[in-house]
Image: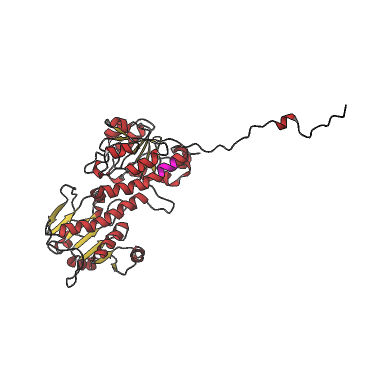
Amino acid sequence: MGKKISSPFSTAELIPQAETLEITKRKSELVIGIPKETHFHEKRVCLTPDAVAALTAQGHKFVIETGAGEGSNFSDKEYSEAGAKIAYDVKEAFGCHMILKVEPASLDEIKLINPQSILFSALQLKTQTKKYFEALASKRITAIAFDFIRDDQGIFSIVKSLSEIAGTASILIAGEIMSNNNEGHGLLLGNIGGVPPTEVVILGAGTVSEFAARSAMGLGASVKVFDNSITKLRSLQHRLGHPIYTSTIQPKTLQKALMRCDVAIGAVRGKSRSPVLVTEEMVMRMKNGAVIIDVSIDCGGNFETSELTTHKKPTFQKHGVIHYCVPNIPSRYSRTASVSISNNFTPYLMNIAEDGGFENAVRFDKSLQKGMYFYHGILTNKTVADWFNLPFRDINLLFL
């Protein structure tokens, strides 16, 4: 017999071996409830049917209260076809682990939320009471205010989108009021050959002011913008790409502009309250039939004569000047506003799912952390804590 030749490979090495594969992060399936808004004259909804369809295609589930989209002309059928379950009991929508709302939840609605749930909504800090935060804490709710969320560039993206709507809408509303069909003197907001252009005075140089000025200029109106920040005024002119009249807020200069103008728009906000920049005496000197649109009325208003009005009865006259002081202007254009809110919400929801759930996402997403004011019932926003004298914990210490 010949000599046996040994193989360089052992039998074990020839048998296929199990390979350790890299384990990818598992997607989290979200169960999201969207109740119908009950706040007075609130017609917006957080997600459109198209957004719901995109998220259900990723495996997420939705429970939407019947009629939630009606105010924005989205039907139950559209949501159902997008893959959502239509709930006829509000408790079912509030019973989901994650709840999306436009307005803050009322105390009665908080009672319907399960402990340890996640609530996305506006906060509207200046309209809240201490009881609201105590109710959230008692349920150990994690709450994120979309009006506090800032992106990587430090921009309050949802607030900015709604401000763009409010700015554009302020000019459209002024144009409606000035017509013969309403209380105005039959003026057309704009510029027609051979007719002096309509004059518009805007207080403030922020996002609302930019889009109000852009809309007014597009119609051919003559625009004057007042703000005490030269930097903001320069930036506004740069963004508009057109030289316009700008000035710091000096009483005599502002009074002259107001006496000549057809429309005055207030869009200056303060840290706690909007500053009163136009006194009652200054309003008395304005043209008979002039229009005031006080966009900042939700924080007190820039005009001393401003009084809160509603979408149902939006105007009143004082000293011959028509005042429009509705605090929630974007809700007047509910479908546009809903699409804007939905487009901002959808990427966050997709990222939360991709990151394996809310707990994982919030650890690494700084914008979500900035929007969060409660984490499992612990108050994490210092502004809220200082405002209502409540105990506060730094969010970073909770993730150690």
Q: Relative to residue 161, is residue 27 depicted above or below?
A: above
- Report the span colored magenta: 348-352
The residue lying at 28 percent from left, 50 percent from top is 336
Residue 59 in the magenta stretch? The answer is: no
Rendered location of residue 162, percent (x, y): 30, 51
Residue 350 in the magenta stretch? The answer is: yes
Rendered location of residue 167, percent (x, y): 27, 56
Q: Nearer the viewer, residue 222 or 267?
A: 222
The residue lying at 45 percent from left, 36 percent from top is 28
Decide whether the magenta segment is chiefly helix, strand or loop: helix
Q: Is residue 394 left or right of residue 191?
A: right
Q: Is residue 155 visible?
A: yes
Q: Is residue 316 left or right of residue 162?
A: left
Q: Nearer the viewer, residue 134 or 336?
A: 336
Q: Is residue 249 visible?
A: no
Q: Nearer the viewer, residue 262 or 194?
A: 194
Position of the N terminus by quadrant: top right
The colouring scheme, among rainbow, by chain, secondary structure or one colour, is: secondary structure
Seen as rendered, the residue at the extreme bottom is 194
Seen as rendered, the residue at the extreme front is 1
Rendered location of residue 69, percent (x, y): 27, 41
Rendered location of residue 204, percent (x, y): 29, 60
Q: Relative to residue 354, is residue 260 depicted above or below?
A: below
Total tally of numbered discs in the picture: 0
Q: Quadrant of residue 66?
A: top left
Q: Quadrant of residue 8?
A: top right
Q: Quadrant of residue 70?
A: top left
